[in-house]
Image: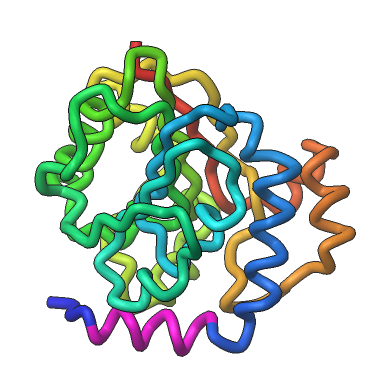
C-alpha cells in the first residue's frame, strides 16, 4: 500500500525539476481553456490537487483542494480551503455546495473502480444541480504500455469507461474529447508555451498529439 511518504517522494522525483515550467503551463491552461467552465462566483473543488497548479491560478469565489499529499498545504497558495482526506470516503462538504469539481491526472491513482465509483458519487452529492465535473487524464487506449510506467498508476481508464461510470453515478455527459492534451510533463517532450497556446486553439492538433481525455459532465 502506498504511504504518504511515497506520495511526497513521487512528486519530488517527477516534478521538482520542472516545477516552474509546470506552473507556467497550468497558468496558460487555466486562462486559455479551463476558466470557461468556472464562473467568477463559483465554488470549486480541485480533486487530487497535488501541488496546486490548477487551483492556484483558477479564479473562483470559493476554492477547495483535496489530496492526501502531505506537501499540498505548502503548495496551493492563499485563499484555498484544504481537505486532506481519502476521496472515496464522505467528503467534508455539504450537499449541493459546489459548482465545479475539477480533476486532472488523478483517477488512475485510485486503487480500483469501487473507489472511483464512491468518489464520483460524492462529487454528485456535493455538486449543485447544473454543477459540472471536469475530468482530465491519460487515456489507456492511446497509451497501452506507457500508462504503466508510473509506480502509482493502478486503474486503467479510457474516455469511454469514465463516461459510462459517470452516467452510472447519475451524471449527464456533455463533452468527450478522447484526445486532448499530450501525455506527460514528467517524461518526454515539454513543448514551449507558445506552441501550447497555439495547440489549444487548433483542435486538429489534438488528434495528432493528444493522449489524455477530457470529459465534462453535469449533475442534472
Compared with 212, 51 (above or below) is below
Residue extending furthest toward the top: 220
Range of magenta residues:
5-15
**In the rendered view, does 193 fall on the left or right side of 109?**
right
Render colour scheme: rainbow
x, y percent for residue 126:
25, 29
Residue extending furthest toward the front: 79
x, y percent for residue 199:
82, 48
At horizontal 48% and vertical 29% (from top left) the residue drawn is: 42
At horizontal 49% and vertical 34% (from top left) the residue drawn is: 215
At horizontal 82% and vertical 63% (from top left) the residue drawn is: 193
Q: Is residue 53 visible?
A: yes
Compared with 197, 44 (above or below) is above
Please identify the quadrant where the C terminus is shown: top left
Compared with 70, 57 (above or below) is above
**In the rendered view, does 56 fall on the left or right side of 25?**
left
Amino acid at each position: 500500500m502506498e504511504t504518504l511518504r511515497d506520495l511526497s517522494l513521487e512528486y519530488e522525483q517527477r516534478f521538482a525539476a520542472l516545477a516552474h515550467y509546470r506552473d507556467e503551463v497550468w497558468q496558460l491552461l487555466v486562462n486559455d481553456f479551463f476558466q470557461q467552465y468556472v464562473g467568477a462566483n463559483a465554488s470549486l473543488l480541485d480533486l487530487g490537487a497535488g501541488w496546486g497548479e490548477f487551483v492556484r491560478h483558477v479564479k473562483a469565489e470559493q476554492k477547495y483542494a483535496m489530496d492526501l499529499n502531505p506537501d499540498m498545504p505548502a503548495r496551493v497558495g492563499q485563499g484555498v480551503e484544504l481537505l486532506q482526506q481519502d476521496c472515496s470516503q464522505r467528503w467534508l462538504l455539504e450537499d449541493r455546495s459546489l459548482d465545479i469539481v475539477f480533476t486532472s491526472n488523478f483517477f488512475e491513482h485510485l486503487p480500483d473502480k469501487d473507489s472511483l465509483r464512491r468518489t464520483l458519487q460524492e462529487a454528485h452529492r456535493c455538486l449543485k444541480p447544473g454543477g459540472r465535473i471536469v475530468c482530465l487524464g491519460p487515456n489507456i487506449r492511446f497509451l497501452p504500455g506507457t500508462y504503466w510506467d508510473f509506480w502509482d498508476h493502478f486503474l486503467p481508464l479510457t474516455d469511454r469507461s469514465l463516461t459510462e461510470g459517470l452516467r452510472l453515478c447519475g451524471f449527464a455527459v456533455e463533452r468527450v474529447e478522447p484526445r486532448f492534451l499530450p501525455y506527460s510533463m514528467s517524461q518526454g517532450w515539454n513543448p514551449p508555451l507558445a506552441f501550447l497556446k497555439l495547440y489549444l486553439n487548433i483542435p486538429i492538433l489534438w488528434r495528432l498529439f493528444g493522449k489524455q481525455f477530457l470529459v465534462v459532465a453535469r449533475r442534472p
